[in-house]
């Protein structure tokens, strides 16, 4: 599931930018382009964090895969 986060976050951005490009986005603060730029940065940060999560989970998997139950 963690491996799909990167793609999902990129799809969120694709949707937002597509809607903005079609003129369907406004901001309660006035300039939607500022909020869109902030969203892009935050989504990029989230994608980097997702990459780190996947890397850590892969390391955990590698470390635990040789372990087995011993009675």
Image (cartoon, grey):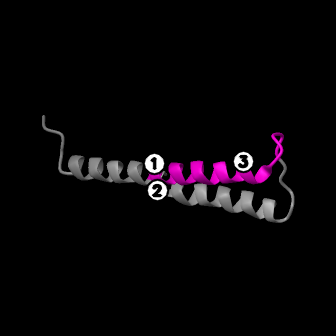
| Secondary structure found at label 1 | helix
Residue sitting at the far left: 71
Residue at 83% x, 53% y is 25
User: Is 22 colored magenta in this rendering?
Assistant: no
In 3D space, how far apart are the residues under numbered discs 3 and 2 (Cα atoms)? 27 Å
18 horizontally vs 42: left or right: right
Q: Mark 1 highlights which residue?
A: 49
Q: Mark 2 highlights which residue?
A: 3
Q: Mark 3 highlights which residue?
A: 35
66 horizontally vs 24: left or right: left
Count of all numbered marks drawn on residues in the image? 3
Q: Which residues are magenta?
A: 27-50
Mark whose residue sits in front, 1 or 2: 1
Quadrant of residue 15 within the rendered picture:
bottom right
Residue at 76% x, 64% y is 18
| Secondary structure found at label 3 | helix
Measured as percent of width and height from the top left, residue 51 is found at 43, 54
Measured as percent of width and height from the top left, residue 28 is found at 84, 40
| Secondary structure found at label 2 | helix
Assess disc 2: are there few (<14), some (14-19) or many (≥20) residues with their C-alpha within 10 Å of its C-alpha. few
58 horizontally vs 49: left or right: left
In 3D space, how far apart are the residues under numbered discs 1 and 2 (Cα atoms)? 11 Å
Mark whose residue sits in front, 3 or 2: 3
Is there CB contact under 8 Å for labels 3 and 1?
A: no
User: Is 45 colored magenta in this rendering?
Assistant: yes
Tell me which label, 1 or 2, sits earlier in the chain.
2
Measured as percent of width and height from the top left, residue 65 is found at 23, 51
């Amino acid at each position: 599931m963690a491996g799909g986060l990167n793609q999902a976050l990129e799809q969120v951005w694709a949707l937002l930018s597509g809607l903005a490009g079609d003129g369907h986005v406004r901001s309660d603060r006035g300039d939607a382009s500022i909020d869109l730029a902030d969203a892009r940065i935050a989504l990029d940060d989230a994608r980097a964090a997702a990459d780190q999560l996947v890397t850590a989970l892969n390391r955990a998997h590698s470390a635990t895969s040789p372990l087995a139950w011993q009675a």
